[in-house]
Image (cartoon, coloured by chain):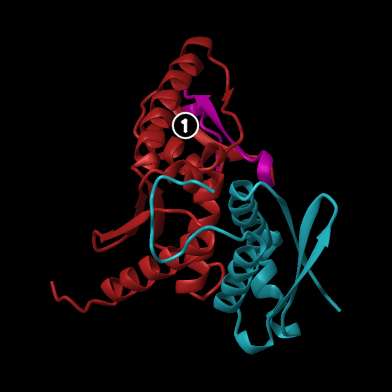
Chain colours: A cyan, B red
Amino acid sequence: MTEGDPSPSTPPSDKAPALRELVLYLARALVEHPDAVVVQEVEEPDATVFELKVAESDLGRVIGRQGRTAKALRTVLSAASAKMKRRAILEILED
Amino acid sequence: MSETSPLAEKREEAARVLREILERMSIDAEVSAFDDGERIILDAHGCESGLVIGKKGATLDSLQYLVSRIVFRTPGEASPIVVDAEGYRGRREDSLADLARRLAEKAVRSGRPVPVEPMSAQDRKVVHKTLAEHPGVRTESEGEGVGRRVVIFPKRSELEHRPA
């Protein structure tokens, strides 16, 4: 990628790992048990799926009232993936 | 006032969280943080601020919601954090206030309720606030979820004001 700014810290070279970091960062910051947060990345033909797993007691913290937190997470993930020219989907695993 | 007020501490934490999120979104933006004693305002600026804003400010709203949840962990509580980019919210507030005043005139002229397009709670608040002192109209929100909207009612006489 040729962005105008030659920032020395983070060259925007590879795409998917950064999105995984984004989901991981947000989920860990939202929950009570950050150590239990797992994000698995699944490549599908037309998109990258991020499967988010948190402690059962933390589900509400990543979903939010009326799904508001989940919706905000998805909006932020889409905004980041738009730049990377790849569709990204967030799935919150409940089991 | 003192430099170590609780809000000032939260302000720095909120700015750090927003910077860390933007960095992981690979968005190149600087974040400035201010507080006016009541609200914490985080303003992202730089050549990629358009990405921070999103369609009709959707990305901005989501970032604001997430930063609020992360910094003030109690759910349901109103958060004093405002996430903005290049003063976008201020510009949007001005244009929403203009729209509200125009539609209020329409309600007065026609003598009929005028619905405003569905919008976020934050935007609805601007419409209510703009028209709170308007002598000719009163406002109410109607509908649920993403369809929730402000309706502007003409106030022909005090007697017609619906009892609460």
Image position of B100 with respect to A40: above or below:
above
Residue beneath disc 1: B138
The quadrant in which the C terminus of chain A is found is bottom right
Pick the front one: B125 or B18: B18
Q: Residue furthest top?
A: B109
Q: What's drawn in magenta, residue-wise?
A: B145-164
Query: Looking at the image, which residue sits at the far left?
Result: B1
Q: In x, y percent, where is residue A32?
A: 60, 85
The answer, for residue A33, to whether it is visible in the render is no
**On what subunit does the disc labeled 1 rest?**
B
Q: Position of residue B96 (x, y in %)?
A: 43, 31
Q: Is residue A11 left or right of residue B5?
A: right
Relative placement, left or right, of B31 versus A72 is left
Residue A66 position (above or below residue B159): below
**At x 50% / y 34%, what residue is drawn?**
B139
Taking A75 as reference, is A60 above or below it?
Answer: below
The x and y percentages for residue B112 are 57, 17
The picture places residue B88, in percent across and down from the top left corner, at: 39, 40
The answer to whether residue A52 is visible is yes
Relative side of A77 to B24, left or right: right
Does dot 1 land on a helix, a strand or a loop? Answer: strand
What is the number of callouts on the image?
Answer: 1
Location of residue B101 with respect to B61 vertically, above or below: above
Residue B146 in magenta stretch: yes
Which quadrant holds residue B128?
Answer: top left
Residue type at mark 1 is Arg
The residue positioned 47% from the left and 31% from the top of the image is: B138
Does residue A39 show up magenta in the picture? no
